[in-house]
Amino acid sequence: MSKPHLTLVVAFLACQFLAPTAARAGDFEVEQGIAFCQAGQVELKLDLAYPVGGKGPYPALIYIFGSGWGYWPAGRTECQLDIMKAAERGYVAIAIDYRQTNIKEGGQVKYRFPDQLHDAKGAVRWLRANAEKYHVDPEHIGVAGYSSGGHIALMLGLTRPSDGLEGSCGDTDYSSSVQAVVSSAGPTELKSQYNTDPDEAAAIEALIGGNPQQMALEYEKASPVSYVYRNSPPILTIHGDLDKDVPIEQAFLLDRRMKELGASHTLIIRKNAGHNDFTAEPEAFEFFDTYLKQKH
């Protein structure tokens, strides 16, 4: 899964010390470091980009970074360009924090699945709670994620209150549902993903708390393919055919399951591409435009 370059790591670390700020850029504004949820001892923050000069309401997009759920250093600043591109296209867009597995207590991982999913659901609730302030259309919210962020995005899109994974992050008077999902190289079935290589196995063990033999039910519970249903939100998967970190079979597994149940899934295979982030590619925005801007 996502192994960020050093420059991104430095940018991430530097931005942890920034107070909330606002900056004007073209036809949108950017606000950084907005607290959206107190999750245990962690204050989760987001960066926001939104159109100015229009009336709205605007559809909203949530971007979730990849980090092996915290196995590799990364943060929401990796999605800065994504949210700005989205705002230019008429979306209110946020890049979010989530609790990561590199936080330890007594030598043990402190935040495991489903904490990361709970945090993403809290971000959706924050958007709806602040819909009037930022001119958000609360009925048209999408989510995009890369690598482990794609896994969280898929879980956010596919899980329902009846699955018992809502958590208590944010104002629970608001729904955590989303209306469209884009996953770029997101793992869809963790038991098979575990066998990719030792780093992948270590990242998943940190997330789940053990290996598939020890925790088979937990692996199933944390796998997006387990939650597909006929009326699932439409999903677009973009995946490189040479991806060695998250093999393309992960995309095929979800595609087969979605089609078995008659759910809407679009799969774009990038030829000769590896483990890359395609969440802000033209095809992703065209997909969101179709399901979040047009009437169905």
Image (tube, grey):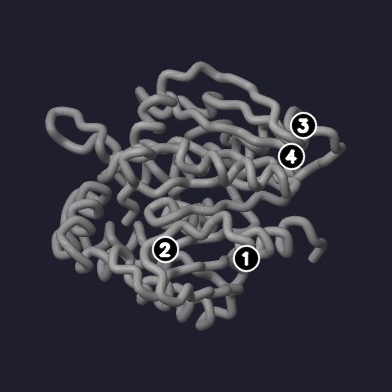
3 vs 1, front mark: 1
Distance from disc 2 to disc 3, alpha carbons, whole Å, reads: 34 Å
Residue lying furthest right: 55
Residue 25, quarter of picture = top right
**Is residue 73 positioned above or below 295 on the image?**
above
Callout 2: few (<14), some (14-19), or many (20+) C-alpha neighbours within 10 Å? many
Callout 1: few (<14), some (14-19), or many (20+) C-alpha neighbours within 10 Å? some
Distance from disc 4 to disc 2, alpha carbons, whole Å, reads: 28 Å
1 vs 4, front mark: 1
Which SS class for mark 1? Answer: helix
Q: Which residue is at 15% across, 64% downward?
A: 213
2 vs 3, front mark: 2
Q: Quadrant of the C terminus?
A: bottom right
Mark 4 or mark 2: whose residue is earlier in sequence: 4
Pointer 2 residue: 185
Residue type indicated by callout 2: Ala
Q: Which residue is at 26% across, 70% downward?
A: 192
Disc 3 vs disc 1: Cβ atoms closer than 8 Å? no
Q: Which label was assigned to residue 136? A: 4
Callout 4: few (<14), some (14-19), or many (20+) C-alpha neighbours within 10 Å? many
Q: Is residue 69 left or right of residue 205?
A: right
Q: Which residue is at 36% across, 28% downward?
A: 13
Disc 4 vs disc 2: Cβ atoms closer than 8 Å? no
4 vs 2, front mark: 2
Q: Which residue is at 39% across, 56% downward?
A: 147
Mark 2 or mark 3: whose residue is earlier in sequence: 3
Residue 232 is situated, as x and y percent measured from the top left of the image, at: 58, 66
Q: Which label was assigned to residue 132? A: 3
Residue 33 is situated, as x and y percent measured from the top left of the image, at: 52, 24
Of the pair 276 and 257, the residue shown nearer to us = 276
Residue 182 is situated, as x and y percent measured from the top left of the image, at: 55, 60
Mark 3 or mark 1: whose residue is earlier in sequence: 3
